[in-house]
Structures are given as structure tokens and as C-alpha cells.
Image (tube, rainbow, N blue to C red):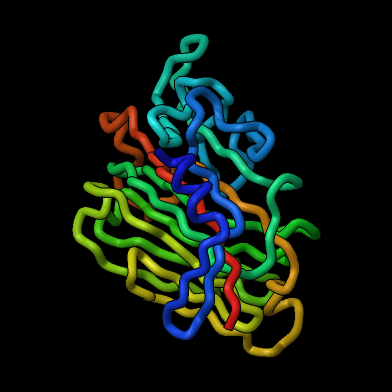
């Protein structure tokens, strides 16, 4: 059914809140197996940032499409007698890049202490954080009723303790599918969970170090693990695995105001 949605709505124009939105690209995950490699790149090996302990793979046990949905599964496995967390991370770099517009993803979150799924983008040039990072959705299993959005740039990021972000409280968000979205304009980004806008990040007009978001970005979907707990707090709850991050669709709209 999804392919018929795409054919029907590809050129659909929707008028809402004074904006004209036109669907220009959609990933409906219609073909079973691995995600389409004409759109998605697979990142493989040990995670490289944030002290994350997981290994990313391209194996069907960690990532596959089934019944119109992308399923990213995080596992706790024994590899050569050693405990290992495995998961998946895919991106559209060099295959689907975009500047401005509404990116929306319908997804169902995993649950449990240590889980850290995300829907986010990075700029295509430069190093982090100067390239710019847009976290459309971040969710930490140890804070189970909170969904977050964050924006990182060279001059404003968590390493400087001046990062910009917002949160929405929603009881047990992992029980159902929700739509997570950003509407990216040249001077601001508005973040949504379902139909509710809960955070807006506005350009301060301070230059590219503050606002590198007038250049292309690419999309990333992944399920990581969080280990940076405060001293004395329990760590990852190994009893929760396997955990699945399920993505129903990704859609990109052009916005004309």
C-alpha cells in the first residue's frame, strides 16, 4: 500500500499554517531485506563517539525491512567469549542530501535503561560540530517520559555547556508510533512530536559558527547506547535486550512561505 501512497502524494501540495508543503522525497520501506543501498549507507564497526559501547553491523539480525517498516535491533551477544552490544546505523550521505524543508519520520521507540535511538542530520562539509548537527529526535531510556531535540554548531554545543535544545514530556512514548519532525527554514528550525511544536531554534545572526544551516545536510537513523551516567547510577540494563527501533517512513517536504 505504501508505494501507492507515494505515487498518489508525490506531487501533492498541502496548505497549512500559512505554508505550502510539497512532498519531494519519501522512503516508505516497501522492499523486505536490507534497506535500499541506492539511498542508504551502512556504518560498520565500533561506535566512534560519546564512549558508546555498541558495534554497528550490516547484518539482518541488526537491521532489516519487514512489512513496510525498517527495524533496527540492538542485541547483547557473546562474540569470542566476550559480551558485545550490536546495533545498526545508516545514513544518506552522498545519496540524499537537502537544505531546508520539513523532515518527518514516523517511528516507534525502544525502551529500557541505556537505550539511545536518534533521528538526526549532519552537514556534508567540515568536522563536528562546525558542520552543524540537527537532532530531530533523541530519546534516552533512563528518562523514559521525555523526548528531546538538539542543535549543535561550532559556537553552541554541549562541550561549551551552551547547547541549544528542547524537550517534551509524554508518558510512555515507546508504546505507540509517533511522528517526529523538524521544519527547517533559513533562519530557524521548529521541532515537533506529532502535531505539537515543542522547541524552536532561531538564528542569532552571528555568522556560520552559530548558524551553518544554509548548506546541505544528510539524514542518519541509528540506535546507540548511553553509558555516561552520573557517578553511582546504575548503567545499561542488560536484561532489556533485544530492543527494536522501528521506523515506518521518512518524508521530506519542500516548504514555501
The percent position of residue 46, horizontal first and vertical second, equals 60, 32
- Of residues 186 and 117, the one drawn nearer to the viewer in this rendering: 186
What's the residue at 34%, 46% (across, down)? 109
What count of labels does the image hold?
Answer: 0
Judge whether 96 appears above or below 85 on screen: below
What's the residue at 62%, 75% (across, down)? 156
| Quadrant assignment, res 128 | bottom right
Residue that protrudes farthest toward the right in the picture: 126
The quarter of the image holding the C terminus is bottom right
The percent position of residue 182, horizontal first and vertical second, equals 50, 67
The percent position of residue 150, horizontal first and vertical second, equals 50, 67
Residue that protrudes farthest toward the front in the picture: 8
What's the residue at 26%, 54% (across, down)? 173
Residue that protrudes farthest toward the top in the picture: 80
| Quadrant assignment, res 194 | bottom left
Q: Is residue 191 left or right of residue 120?
A: left
Residue 135 visible from this viewpoint: no
The quarter of the image holding the N terminus is top left
- Of residues 172 and 98, the one drawn nearer to the viewer in this rendering: 98
Residue 221 visible from this viewpoint: yes
The percent position of residue 2, horizontal first and vertical second, equals 43, 41
Judge whether 257 appears above or below 55 on screen: below
Q: Is residue 39 left or right of residue 181?
A: right
Residue that protrudes farthest toward the left in the picture: 171
| Quadrant assignment, res 112 | top left
Amino acid at each position: 500500500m505504501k508505494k501507492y501512497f507515494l505515487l498518489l502524494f508525490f506531487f501533492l501540495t498541502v496548505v497549512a499554517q500559512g505554508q505550502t508543503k510539497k512532498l519531494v522525497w519519501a522512503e516508505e520501506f516497501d522492499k523486505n531485506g536490507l534497506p535500499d543501498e541506492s539511498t542508504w549507507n551502512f556504518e560498520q564497526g565500533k561506535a566512534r563517539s560519546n564512549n558508546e559501547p555498541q558495534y554497528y553491523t550490516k547484518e539482518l539480525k541488526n537491521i532489516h525491512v519487514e512489512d513496510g517498516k525498517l527495524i533496527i535491533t540492538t542485541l547483547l551477544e557473546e562474540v569470542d567469549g566476550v559480551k558485545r552490544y550490536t546495533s545498526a546505523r545508516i545514513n544518506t550521505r552522498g545519496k540524499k542530501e537537502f537544505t531546508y524543508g520539513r523532515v518527518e519520520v514516523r517511528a516507534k521507540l525502544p525502551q529500557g535503561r541505556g537505550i539511545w535511538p536518534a533521528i538526526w542530520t549532519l552537514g556534508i562539509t567540515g568536522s563536528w560540530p562546525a558542520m552543524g548537527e540537527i537532532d530531530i529526535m533523541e530519546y534516552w531510556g533512563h528518562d523514559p517520559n521525555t523526548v528531546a531535540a538538539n542543535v549543535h554548531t561550532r559556537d553552541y554545543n554541549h562541550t561549551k555547556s551552551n547547547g541549544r535544545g528542547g524537550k517534551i514530556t509524554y508518558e510512555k512514548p515507546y508504546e505507540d508510533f509517533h511522528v517526529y519532525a523538524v521544519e527547517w527554514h533559513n533562519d530557524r528550525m521548529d521541532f515537533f512530536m506529532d502535531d505539537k511544536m515543542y522547541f524552536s531554534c532561531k538564528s542569532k545572526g552571528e555568522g556560520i559558527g552559530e548558524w551553518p544551516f544554509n548548506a546541505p545536510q544528510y539524514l542518519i537513523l541509528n540506535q546507540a547506547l548511553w553509558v555516561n551516567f552520573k557517578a553511582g547510577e546504575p548503567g545499561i540494563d542488560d536484561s532489556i535486550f533485544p530492543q527494536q527501533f522501528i521506523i515506518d517512513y521518512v518524508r521530506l517536504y519542500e516548504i514555501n512561505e
